Amino acid sequence: MRTITDFCTGWRFAKTASVPAALPESWEAVTLPHTGNAVDGQDGGNDYWRGTAMYAKAFARPALEENGCAVLEFLGAAMTAKVWVNGKKLAHHEGGFSTFRVDITDVLAEENLLCVSVDNGENDRVYPQKADFTFYGGLYRGVNLITVSAAHFALLQNGTPGIHAPPKLSEDLHSAEVTVEAWVEGSARNVKFSINGKTQDAAVMDGHAQTVFRLDPVHLWDGVDDPYLYTVLAQLESGDEVSARFGCRTIRMDPGQGFFLNGRSYPLRGAARHQDRAGLGNALTRKEHQEDIEMIKEIGANTVRLAHYQHAQEFYDLCDEAGLIVWAEIPYITQHMPNGRANTLSQMCELITQCYNHPSIVCWGLSNEITASGTADEDLLENHRQLNALCHELDATRPTTMAYVFMLETDSPLIDIADVGSYNLYFGWYIGELSQNDSFFDAYHAKFPNCCFGFSEYGADANPQFQTNTPDKGDYTEQYQCVYHEHLLQCIEQRPYLWATHLWNLFDFAADGRDEGGKNGVNQKGLVTMDRKLKKDAFYLYKAAWADPVRAPFVHI
Ligand code: GCB
């Protein structure tokens, strides 16, 4: 048996590093998801609170089967977390965006006190430390208590779901072989797997069970038109069971023709998104995730770059269901830290092992603008080589990529590391003229015709309160944002070799260090305001260019 109890209520919160001995009734009562930076992380001045805060919650001993286990699951604790139960320290986790779990079976009493510290303060090894977004702290994604039988699917391997289902398609795409693997903790002889009513048993050897399903004919996961998902269920004699969804599809990036999905050309056009909302910070619920997905779909995008870190599992689930192609990445960003290599590797390991089954994800992003405040020195290069090798070791099915800063020399050794590259260019906004976007790509493609590369960021800020009849670069008006994107839309349409294009950003987001364009603390490159209430004119420009006019006819004046 497995029970999952939502642990989002009954918390007390304070900005302190000291671990209380009893539930501190005087602390603020909070419900998860929660961040302490929902207000100060969005008001500008770059003075939002960063440091160690503590959450405490009392709970009664859960019912356990004989030799059963109790495991706490943290879906996101930013950025470094420590966990105590009844005063005993049980975990230390570095990385604010991934799931981790803690076995608490041995320390349980009749009445228990759970304390979790979260630290979003500065240090020299946990990414991110320097970037253009607010580093919210908190238990901002929820916590669960999981109880399982003595024999159960693995809970303690990097926060993974304990089951992998990579499909391999036949060349004609008519059938697929799915190698289903599960990892088991405790003693079990057999795993019973089933997909769509078809059942196969596999013996457990050294905690691992594997079987191959043949799907013939196979129903493809075919992007936004038909994002068909299979579910694989795995069961143990103990009664424990887990399931995972997967999709059958092939992907290919071609240096001359761009992206291919299931063998056909499928130009990737879309936007980036942060997990963030006005008034809420990063503490989003399913409702906000769903609203974001609807707006991504509304402009007719077929891809989303989930920047600059691992997003909530439910968001990747929604992308799977919507047929969106996803670029996933870790927050190895802006500034390389010589002491941060282990953290990049552990964040990448968690990203891949936790997100492996999502058919929407097509690449792993190693870093973003990592040379923005330094050079590509040997330590940085070696960090990238190791990350790249780790990705291939953990996942033989997806390529790696990187988002280069515009001033990275096109012959930098960094460019040779990831399987496919991508540039962030802001010609026509921060620097230069709009036409330099076109000439940059033309020159790059001419010089490296066998190299796959994409356009990972482009954008211009707009404050809807700023309107003009004479739009000009740097004026923050909605009109200049439109002029900018009209040009960029043409630029990308004329360059089918780009393997993907992601405008920056679909939504305004908190960047507490910014004070500009009539607003404090906000990056205003979004096509939609941070409260999601106002769609700027450029939103409709993309909708007109990309959305299906038959399914969603509209007029915007
Ligand atoms: C970038 C960064 C992104 C920033 C963006 C901007 O290149 O990758 O994190 O928010 O530029 O708006 O300047």
Image (cartoon, rainbow, N blue to C red):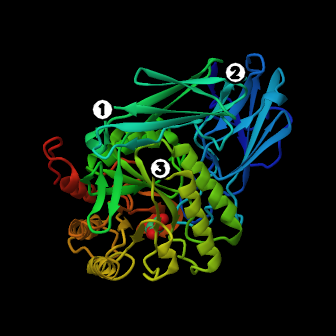
Q: Which residue is mark 2?
A: 149
In the image, is 289 to the left or to the right of 68?
left
Residue linked to disc 3: 278
Name the kind of residue labelled 2 in the image.
Ser
The mark nearer the N terminus, 1 or 2, is 2
Separation of residues labelled 3 and 2 (CA atoms)? 42 Å
Question: Relative to the observer, which residue lies in front, 107 or 377?
Answer: 377
Give the percent coordinates (x, y) of residue 6: 61, 27
**Picture coordinates of residue 490, whole percent (x, y):** 21, 68
In front: label 1 or label 3: 1
Residue 217 badge: 1
Mark with earlier residue (3, 2): 2
Whether residue 227 is visible, yes or no, is yes
Looking at the image, residue 90 lies above or below residue 528: above
Nearest to viewer (mark 1 / mark 2) = 1
Q: Nearer the viewer, residue 220 or 142?
A: 220
Helix, strand or loop for disc 2: loop
Amino acid type at circle 1 is Pro
The residue shown at (37%, 32%) is 215
Find residue 124 and report its horizontal and vertical position in percent: 71, 67
